Image (tube, rainbow, N blue to C red):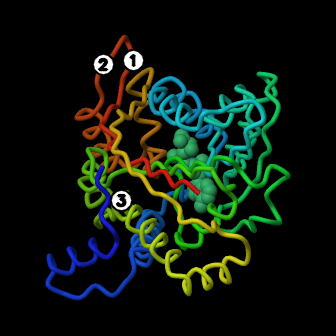
Amino acid sequence: MQIPGPSEIKAKSALEHGVAITRTAAERWDEQMRAWQQCQAATGRRGLSAWESARAARRYWEQVCSYQQERLNFLISRLQPAAGKRILDIGSGPGVMAIPLAESGARVTAVDPSPAMLELLKHIATERGVAGINCLAGRWEELDTLQHLDGNLPYQAVVASLSLLMVGIRDCLLKMMQACSSGGKIYLLWGRGKNHWTEQLSQLYPELYGFQYLPKPGAGLLLEVVLELREGLAGSKTNENCRKSAGCDLPSALPEVEAEEVDFIYRESFDSATEALAHFLDYFGVEEADRPRVAIIEEFLRRNLKTHNGSLLLEHPLPALLITISI
Ligand SMILES: C[S@@+](CC[C@H](N)C(=O)[O-])C[C@H]1O[C@@H](n2cnc3c(N)ncnc32)[C@H](O)[C@@H]1O
């Protein structure tokens, strides 16, 4: 993929909109992520994320291992695990990558704010006799890299797959660069904006909650943030400021940035229509007694579930971008 410089992107957007764009890409990312978080909070659902309960963690593990193997294999092949390789997995979930990486001999640090996800990761690692995974509970933006990360620092590879639910993205990326050794790589996998699922949510939110769905910022904007950061590091003055604000070593050479469009299929399966309904009532925070809203979910399931080998499958394209930053 041909990558434009951030100034080119800004100039193009300014021309398209007929206005001078003054906000940085990082500010636009933070604004959109905050808006998405507020939109989620306004639904009044129990948890802000779908990953907080032990049941959700177990389901995530089972579903991703069964139906998203293609995505996992793709990322694992990029990470090139080897005996003793130090890998940082940010937003590890229940270890869908951390466990196979450690099985290949890598020394993995798994960071995740969900205690249920990390509990399950430890449980599965013990069950499989996998050593070499260190778990750190917390949001990436809140962790003090140097104090909290373990003896694995600096990492030869850092990965954040579908987990950049972060405000303060610029500092989050700088922290990843600090954690990565010279010659190491950072891999960011993130959705390329509008897709079938976000279209479904855009239709469902007004019906279920009475307001519009606000999407997360997309991978195009993430790429702008990364390039903006790189451009910032290029100016020696900014470089100094970055170093000061980061409070520790940043790469002395300019990181190289590559972006690759990858198209996966998101799949989730259910044994029965009753199981699917219970899952989505919980997901959307709808009570069984709330008949009008239950009917909306039933209609959504009728439109989207397919029968496959005796079970019900929810399937939609997951267009994503893999951004690789070589330090
Ligand atoms: C969609 S799952 C992705 C899990 C795994 N990386 C994968 O590729 O399947 C997102 C994970 O990111 C975690 N997460 C959310 N916000 C985070 C943050 N600010 N810092 C670190 N992890 C975060 C969630 O708890 C969840 O386990």
Judged by depth in the image, the label closer to the viewer, 3 or 2, is 3
Q: Is residue 277 above or below residue 183?
A: above
Q: Is residue 192 above or below residue 303?
A: below
Foreground residue, 42 or 148?
148
Judged by depth in the image, the label closer to the viewer, 3 or 1, is 3
Please give the residue where the numbered disc 3 appears in the rendered image.
218
Q: Position of residue 56 (x, y in %)?
A: 58, 40
Q: Is residue 216 above or below residue 168?
A: above
* Amino acid, disc 1: Ser
Density class for disc 2 (Cα within 10 Å; few <14, some 14-19, many ≥20) is few
Q: Position of residue 252 (x, y in %)?
A: 63, 68
Q: Which image quarter holds the C terminus?
A: bottom right
Q: Position of residue 272 (x, y in %)?
A: 41, 22
Q: Are marks 2 and 1 in contact (CB under 8 Å)?
A: yes
Q: Which mark is residue 311?
A: 1
Mark 3 vs mark 2, CA separation in Å: 31 Å
Give residue 26's quadrant in the image. bottom left
Residue at the (33%, 60%) spot, across then down:
220
* Amino acid, disc 2: Thr
Foreground residue, 189 or 294?
189
Q: Position of residue 107 (x, y in %)?
A: 77, 39
Density class for disc 3 (Cα within 10 Å; few <14, some 14-19, many ≥20) is some
* Amino acid, disc 3: Gly
Please give the residue where the numbered disc 2 appears in the rendered image.
307
Residue at the (78%, 35%) spot, across then down:
84
Q: Which mark is residue 84?
A: none
Residue at the (42%, 30%) spot, across then down:
268
Sequence-wise first label, 3 or 2: 3
